[in-house]
Amino acid sequence: MSQDDLLNVYRAYLQCLNERQWPRLGEFVADQLSYNGRRMTLQDYRAMLEGDIDAIPDLQFRPEVLIAEDDVVACRLFFECTPRHAFLGFEPTGGQVSFPEHVFYRFDDDRRIAEVRSVIDVQAIREQVSRGR
């Protein structure tokens, strides 16, 4: 798969997330995958994402930097959202928070995500929550 093809698949995956098209998630994510070194099923991954959306209903996945090489996509996502329930151990303040996520995806031969490595800037969230933002 070319880099352009891989990036197009990834963009379609983000669209699926942003439009909450959960039944389509299997088009983009393998039945078995690794998330930060933890094995999980597609159903586990979907439940995790749905939990994030439940906590933050206005969560939108917006790529700032997007690079593909071989079977890997690297992305810096930037979020501006308003948590309604506890998220990453933080209680909501009613205010908006903004934070980046740096994430690497490895795709399998079927053009589906088989591995996710994610780092979220929790300190940025902590600082905003402590200020009451």
Image (tube, grey):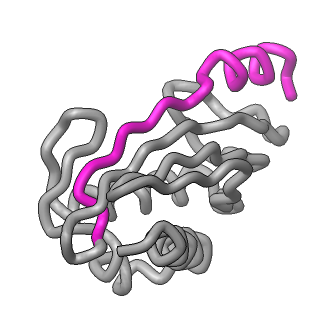
Q: Residue at x 37, y 85 (%)?
A: 24
Within the image, what quadrant is residue 83 found in?
Answer: top right
Q: Is residue 109 above or below residue 96?
A: below
Figure disc tally: 0
> Which stretch appears magenta?
112-133
Please identify the quadrant where the C terminus is shown.
Answer: top right
Q: State yes or no: residue 44 in magenta.
A: no
Camera-side residue of 64 and 23:
64
Q: Residue at x 64, y 47 (%)?
A: 77
Q: Position of residue 82 (x, y in %)?
A: 75, 47
Q: State yes or no: residue 119 in magenta.
A: yes
Q: Position of residue 76 (x, y in %)?
A: 63, 43
Camera-side residue of 73 and 58:
73
Q: Is residue 20 above or below residue 43?
A: below
95 sits left or right of 81 in the view: right
Please identify the quadrant where the N terminus is shown.
Answer: bottom left
Q: Residue at x 58, y 43 (%)?
A: 85
76 sits left or right of 104 in the view: right
Camera-side residue of 97 and 109:
109
Q: Position of residue 61 (x, y in %)?
A: 63, 59
Q: Position of residue 53 (x, y in %)?
A: 54, 59
Q: Residue at x 29, y 61 (%)?
A: 107
Q: Is residue 58 above or below residue 75?
A: below
